[in-house]
Image: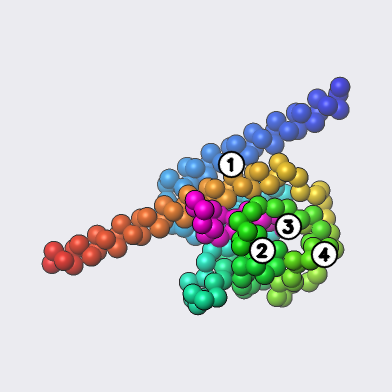
Amino acid sequence: VAVENARLFEEIQRRTRESAALAELGRDISSTLDLPTVMDRIARHAKELLGVDNSAIFLPDEGAEASAPAFRAIVAVGDIADAIQRSVIRPGHGIIGSLIQSGRAEFVNNTNADPRAVLMARTVNRQDERLMVAPLRAGNVVRGAMAVWRTAGQPFQTSDLEFLVGLSMAATVAMENARLFAEAQQRAAELDTVNT
């Protein structure tokens, strides 16, 4: 009974921290339309609350050709952040690219054993690397992905994935707000030009 009570207490504490983080993200999203700032906050919350080594948010690469879509990290936090930001993710290639293509959220507790795994440039192959990815979905369209990495430590669980999906939903809202604001500004500028 004591062990079960301790487990339940820990679960309640974790959910309380996650709820507080999601509430704070909601305030952040409504307080600024600066996409990099909001995405940085989301990535930092993911790193802290999930107890991971690295966290990143990937968005479409504007410089990529339309025939070969690609994604790059708009923000990366952790010890391999530079390597993550230099990496290009292609739909269907690697674990992250495969999950962007499928639109599914998933965790992989042993990336070395996953046949989809590819080594990111300028990183070393780490034993016991764990990866969790949640696509950023706007309706049925995947607009990017959140990814977190953990080396050793506890394996990811379904509750971790559920929290990451919640964070990815907040990131999608921030993206859509920034996109709609940019469109409204462009329309206002066009109307101003017509009026002039």
Which mark is first along the chain, 4 or 2? Answer: 2
Tell me the residue at 79%/63% (across/down): 114
Q: Secondary structure at mark 3?
A: strand
Query: Which one is nearer the viewer's eye here, 133 or 22?
Result: 133
Real-space Cα separation, disc 4 to disc 3, in angstroms: 10 Å
Residue 136 located within the stretch drawn in magenta:
yes
- Image quarter for residue 120? bottom right
Query: Residue 22 appears at what percent x and percent y?
Result: 56, 41
- Image quarter for residue 159? top right
Identify the residue position indicated by label 1 in the image: 21
Is the Cβ of the residue at disc 1 closer than 8 Å to that at disc 4?
A: no
Query: Which one is nearer the viewer's eye here, 191 or 9?
Result: 191
* Residue type marked 1: Ala
Identify the residue position indicated by label 3 in the image: 131
* Residue type marked 2: Ser
Real-space Cα separation, disc 1 to disc 4, in angstroms: 31 Å
Relative to residue 153, is residue 63 depicted above or below?
A: below
Real-space Cα separation, disc 2 to disc 1, in angstroms: 28 Å
Identify the residue position indicated by label 2 in the image: 98
> In the rendered view of the protein, which quadrant contains the N terminus?
top right
Identify the residue position indicated by label 4 in the image: 112
Q: Is residue 53 visible?
A: no
Real-space Cα separation, disc 2 to disc 3, in angstroms: 13 Å
Residue 176: which disc?
none
Query: Which one is nearer the viewer's eye here, 121 or 109?
Result: 109
Real-space Cα separation, disc 1 to disc 3, in angstroms: 21 Å
Which mark is first along the chain, 4 or 1? Answer: 1
Real-space Cα separation, disc 2 to disc 4, in angstroms: 16 Å
* Residue type marked 4: Asn
Looking at the rendering, the stretch of residues picked out in magenta corresponds to 132-149
* Residue type marked 3: Leu
Name the colour scheme: rainbow
